[in-house]
Amino acid sequence: MKLINICNRVIEFSFYALFLLVPLVLAGDTSELFEFNKMWFAFSLGIVIAAAWGVKSLLSGGIKIQRTPLDIPIILFLASQIVSTIFSLDQHVSIWGYYSRFNGGLLSTTLYIFLYYAFVSNLLKKEKDEGKSFNAKIVKRILNISLVSGIIVSLWGIPSHFGYDPTCFLFRGNFDVSCWAEDFQPKVRIFSTLGQPDWLSAYMAILIPVSAALFLEKVKGNLKPLFSKVNIPALFYFISFILFTVSLLYSGSRSGFLAVSLALVILLLGYFFLNRKKINLIAPAILIFTTVVFTFFIGAPFGILNKISYGGLKTALAPPPPSSQPKVEKPAPQHSGELGGTDSSKIRLIVWRGALNAWKNNPLFGTGVETFAFAYYKYKSADHNLTSEWNFLYNKAHNEFLNYLATTGLFGLGTYIAMMGIFLYQSLKKLLKDGNSGNKLLVLGLIASYITISVTNFFGFSVVIVNIYLFLIPAFVLALEKLINYEKSLVVPRSFKTSSIDLSPFQWVGIIATCLVGIYLLYNLLVFWNADKAFGYGNNLNRAGYYQEAYPYLQKAAMARESEPIYKDELAVNNAILATSILSGGNTQNATEASATALKLSQEAISKSTEVISAYPNNFVFWKTRVRIFYTLAQVDPNMLIQALDAVKHAQALAPNDASINYNLGVIQGQSGNIDEAIKVLEATIKLKPDYRDPRYALGLFYYQKAVDKDGKVVDRSYLEKAKSEMKYILNRLGSNDGQAQETLKTLEAK
């Protein structure tokens, strides 16, 4: 039927759009520029595909789901995510994913699995003529589209290394890198439209083996076809390979570099093995030479390799400075990253240890899908406070395997590894058995690409486009290796009709209902997207201190998406600050009206916070917000300190080794009149983080309170000396220009 053909075309072109546009999608007015928009675009295409498949099924008289060799591991993996969500610390986060990215939640995982079955059930078909492979054409078409997208991403990102970023031009009108913060400079590490250097490198690592494999297929050991008009594709794949390699090197990602190195070794060894009867060295030599040359001139993200790069040799061979210049002493070695601070590998090991601690306490099903932020802070070790990222919020384990272990337990990690392992075993077994001469190099390239995902995920975590490839590469390989038995499928109902001329009223009702459901879901995505835009504006204004201007945006977001606790949480903070500002403004005009407005805002703040923490009691971020709300309100109503103290105790129980929460607990204890308890908590806080200035200063003040009586006369010199000691520590070790500590020390020494 014509309508069925239309549905098939919609599904087909939706997949093309998925691989072409997801890596490119970004928006400047949402709370997160990159991943949030990519996830929403993928959700939208998933809905379109589902609606087209649904209409097609109604037209055909039943839904047909193609069976594949990976059904059992995929279903078990999905089951692990569902079970983990049921027992989650925070079901909302487990279902949707951590806010702003959403990738990794149950909904996104369901989408990726759905895309796998939508592809094998709708775009592949049984082929009678073995000489002409329709399925191979579909796969190669998608891969070529993927390479086109990768080229655009590379051309978008490479100029930013030289200070010309198209993203800044798009959103600010300045063709430079001024729109990025100092610690997030593409001139140091590019990230293009992916949003983070390691995410870009993971994407490039997937595409590089594919472009290399297709290049090897086209050249076949002869240089002439590379420049022949007849074989332009060979030149296209070669240029793709170069651009992807350059982008990878400019990203400065160690995990991406390792992944590609391993993938190319696998690809070339496989190439020699599969062509052992007639080995051609020219094509692989071109790839090796190209990789070595660009790595030599650009440099590798490892110091030992950079010593033999162009830049390293240039530095080593440069003449020493003239003796007339003053001798500059070599600084002491520091364990720091490329932008300063603690080396990322050291921090990563600490986070991994926290992930293992979380798993040990939740071994079978974990803490819940995407709940690593809550799990980690409950079990993280104290030495995280000694790193430069001590106060960062870690919502991922920076190791996909440990992330699954911590959040979904042995069941989740086991099924995740089984899903990948079974695919690799079956595909390699088939490849080594008969080679499938028509597509053996492409299959090998796809397998190498799949392995890069495991490598980059081991040192980081997946993003939307990487997960799309994680679930679709197996479908591509199964199609190319003819491992799918098209006689086996799940058909509902069993009396499946392949065609129908006259549609029944039931079919028409079903078709209309399916389209309406699809439109409704797309509309809800749009509402959520617009709510996020309002939240993004309001959140940024709040951070900048423009609370009154932020209020309408946050109110709009909370009203548009009432089920999203993040919006209520941020609005509650805004309400509390506005209420305090009104009451402390000192404006006597319309005092009654102002007081009523402030009372309403404070009540709304408390009500929204109570609603959020009641629904999500294990989310320590919401408890920290509650502390801030009551502490803010306590500036005009000291009675609120009791609620602030209760909230900070809950937060401290959820994150016992977090130095900032312990500091807040100590301060609020002291301001509540519990001086001895405050001193005890603050002393423990500076043991957690000796270089933390604020708790040392507060501790000095509380020591002073213990040292004097109500008239200010010194009654305990030991506490006075302790107070002086804290101020001296701040000035001698943490900042000699600390004016507040200097003035306080002068006051103490005058006693």
Image (spheres, rainbow, N blue to C red):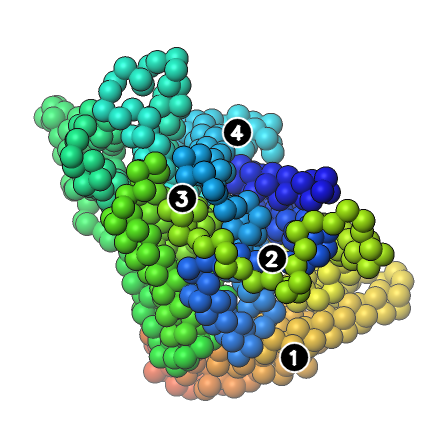
Say which of 307 and 666 sits in front. 307
Label ID, residue 166: 4
Q: How many marks?
A: 4
Mark 3 or mark 1: which is in front? 3
User: Of the residues under marks 1 and 4, which one precedes in the sequence?
Assistant: 4
Give, as a three-letter code, the residue at label 3: Leu
The answer to whether the residue labelled 3 contacts the one labelled 1, judged by CB atoms less than 8 Å apart, is no
Q: Specify which label sits upstream in the sequence, 1 or 2.
A: 2
Mark 4, Cα crowd under 10 Å, few <14 / some 14-19 / many 20+, is many
Front residue of 260 and 746: 260
Please provide percent x and percent y for residue 484.
44, 53
Crowding near the residue tagged with mark 1, few <14, some 14–19, many ≥20 C-alpha atoms within 10 Å: few
Left or right: 553, with 185 as reference point: right
Q: Nearer the viewer, mark 1 or mark 2?
A: 2
Q: CA distance from mark 3 to mark 1?
A: 52 Å
Q: Is residue 680 visible?
A: yes
**Residue 663: numbered disc:** none
- Label at residue 64: 2
Residue shown at the point (17%, 31%) measured from the top left: 278
CA separation in Å, label 1 and label 2: 44 Å
In this rendering, position of residue 316 left or right of residue 81: left
Residue under label 1? 614
Helix, strand or loop for disc 3: helix
Q: Residue at x 65, y 70 (%)?
A: 629
The CA span between labels 1 and 4 is: 45 Å
Can you identify the residue that label 3 sits on? 480
**Element on which disc 1 rests:** helix
Q: For the point 81% across and 70% down, which residue is it?
A: 600
